Image (cartoon, helix red, strand yellow):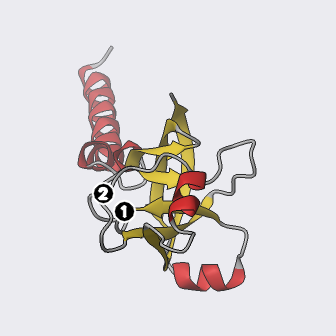
Amino acid sequence: MRVSTVASRIGVILVTGALFVALTGSAAFAGSPNGAASQRPVFYEGKQVTVNMFEVPASETLLDHNRSTNTIYASNDLDDEQDFLSVIDAIQGEGMNPLWHQVLIVFNDGFTPHQFTSEDDVLAAASGPDPEITLVPTDEVYRCSIVRSK
């Protein structure tokens, strides 16, 4: 094989490798907000599951036109570190829509904050004559998929 042919092939390999790293390397090492870096544990009916989520842009408009979202109950905004694991109201095969409306759990005065593990627990704590929590709907929607159940 001629030296110029070998050099040409090596050049193609190096350029292809550099292009691959340029296209994939930064996302792989930076922790893409749409990939595994956005995975978090949540509770569904007393069981812990792992979800992959990201906030949908223009969520408020989406909520105005799409009433078939699921609910994710969070102790504070999902973009921030959570005090407790969130609670979801559905999984695949049980009426799940990939769009989740964020509802904040706010503990009322005189009640100690704690972990909820099901939507039934959340709704029970928000009802009655002296509710333990107040549910505060937000204008944020998240795209959420379940990636693992325990």
Q: Position of residue 123 (x, y in %)?
A: 58, 62
Which quadrant of the view contains residue 29?
top left
Mark 2: which secondary structure?
Answer: loop
- Which amino acid type is marked by label 2? Gln
Image coordinates for residue 89, horizontal then vertical, percent: 62, 54
* Res 109 label: none
Please name the residue that numbered disc 1 is placed on. 75
Residue 145 drawn above or below residue 7: below
Q: Is residue 145 above or below residue 4?
A: below
Q: Position of residue 68 (x, y in %)?
A: 73, 68
Picture residue at 33% right of the left edge, 28% below the top: 9
Q: Amino acid at mark 1?
A: Ser
Residue 111 or residue 92, whichever sits in front: 111
The image quadrant of residue 15 is top left
- Horizontally, is 113 left or right of 68 in the view? left
Which residue is painted at 62% across and 79% down in the image? 62
Question: Taking 63 as reference, is 38 left or right?
Answer: left
Q: Decide: is 89 above or below 46.
A: below
Q: Decide: marks 2, 1 in contact (CB < 8 A)?
A: yes
Local crowd at mark 1 within 10 Å, few (<14), some, or many (≥20)? many
Compare marks 2 and 1 and give the one earlier in the sequence. 1
Residue visible at 53% across and 39% down in the picture: 46
Q: Is residue 139 left or right of residue 76?
A: right
Q: Secondary structure at mark 1?
A: loop
Q: Residues within 10 Å of mark 2 (few under 14, many from 20)?
A: few
Counting the numbered discs, the total is 2
Q: Nearer the viewer, residue 39 or 113?
A: 113
Is 44 on the left-hand or right-hand side of 86?
A: right
- Mark 2 to mark 1: distance in Å? 6 Å
Q: Write down the residue under mark 2.
A: 82
Residues 114 and 21: in front is 114
Residue 4 drawn at (x, y percent): 26, 27
